[in-house]
Image (spheres, rainbow, N blue to C red):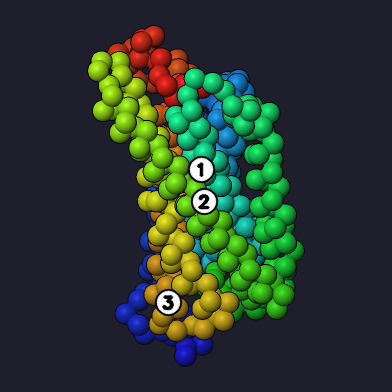
Amino acid sequence: MASSPAQLDCGIHLDVSRLVIMGLYFVLFIPALLLNIMAAWISWKLKNKSSFIVYLKNLVAADLLMTLIFPLRAAEELPGSPWGLRVFNCQFGSVLFYLCMYVSIVLMGVISLDRFFKIVQPGGKLFGQSALVGMGVSAVVWIAILSTSTIPTMVLTSEQPKHNLTSPAELCMAMKSDLGKLYHTAVILLCNVIFFIILVVIFCCYVCIAKKVVKSYRNSRSTNARRKWRVKAHVFIVLLVFLVCFAPYHITRFLYSPKQVENEINCPWASLRVAKDITLWLATTNVCLDPLIYFLLCKAFREKLYELKIFGDRFSLTKQQTEEVTSN
């Protein structure tokens, strides 16, 4: 077993991979910032008429906060990055980053349930789809994740590390007490459980929605009915974004976490470390894909977007085009 990542000879250049990941975060930052500032401005203009609008606003807030943390995550990978920045990122930056990620994951599950009831039981507004319920659910999501993982992790990541640690992974684990390492293992397990529960919820919702969509298509006898079928099919964008962004990371994280806690610096650790970093970056691309969810599923969001005339007058919506079954 090697004593440090720099001594590994596994055909894996960790320093190069870190610089590549750093570059990917910087590349992602500008489009993510522009998209989420625009989404935040539009969502600010929307009235809280339904639970879906409330969930959308909270998802925008989580995505925007995550985007603002990108420069911190990239800067700590720079050669000669300030020691204080790396310590700050271990104790606060990375923890807030994961807070935003899991808030987004849970909200995607809640949005899937909301769309399930909207499509499977159309024509009436359920109590669970009211704005008041949406605010309550969103508050519970933020408070639950803050209290169970975010704040305790910050408190338990406060040890004085050695200055000769070059890898952020080594540094962050060195800043944890023995209790902090045990808690870290528990948090990782909890986060994986949350992911797989939400995955099951989303899968079940979209199996039912798919049956409804197929039945609607078979029964359609008019152009308008076919248009409604296409609109219902748009809800599958949530499932697509969820699987593409989050599934690879959680599979890799499940394998990597035991070796991270043991702090065994060897070739399997190095391979999983690189895979974890790449899939984590892939998970962050959801901040660029989530605006597509807002656009396809929220009529009010689309209308506000077209008011900006970013795409020119050619794309102005007619009344017929905006009367869709996914309207909120």
Camera-nearest label, 3 or 2: 2
- How would you rate the neighbour count of disc 1 (Cα within 10 Å): few for under 14, some for 14-19, many for 20 or more? many
SS class, disc 3: helix
Camera-nearest label, 1 or 3: 1
Compared across the picture, whether 69 is left or right of 279 comes to right
Depth order, front residue of 130/103: 130
Q: Position of residue 73 (x, y in %)?
A: 53, 57
Q: CA distance from mark 2 to mark 1?
A: 8 Å
Q: Is residue 115 visible?
A: no
Q: Position of residue 243 (x, y in %)?
A: 40, 51
Q: Position of residue 258 (x, y in %)?
A: 53, 76
Q: CA distance from mark 3 to mark 2?
A: 29 Å
Mark linked to residue 198? 2
Asked if disc 2 and disc 1 are in contact, CB closer than 8 Å, the reply is yes
For disc 1, the marked residue is: 108
Q: Earlier in the sequence, mark 3 or mark 2?
A: 2
Q: Position of residue 50 (x, y in %)?
A: 59, 25
Compared across the picture, whether 196 is left or right of 93 comes to left
For disc 3, the marked residue is: 270
> Disc 2 residue type?
Ile
Tell me which residue sits at (35%, 26%) in the image: 231
Quadrant position of residue 230: top left
Tell me which residue sits at (42%, 77%) in the image: 270
SS class, disc 1: helix
Q: Is residue 148 above or below residue 173?
A: above
Q: Residue furthest bottom?
A: 1
Q: Earlier in the sequence, mark 2 or mark 1?
A: 1
Camera-nearest label, 2 or 1: 2
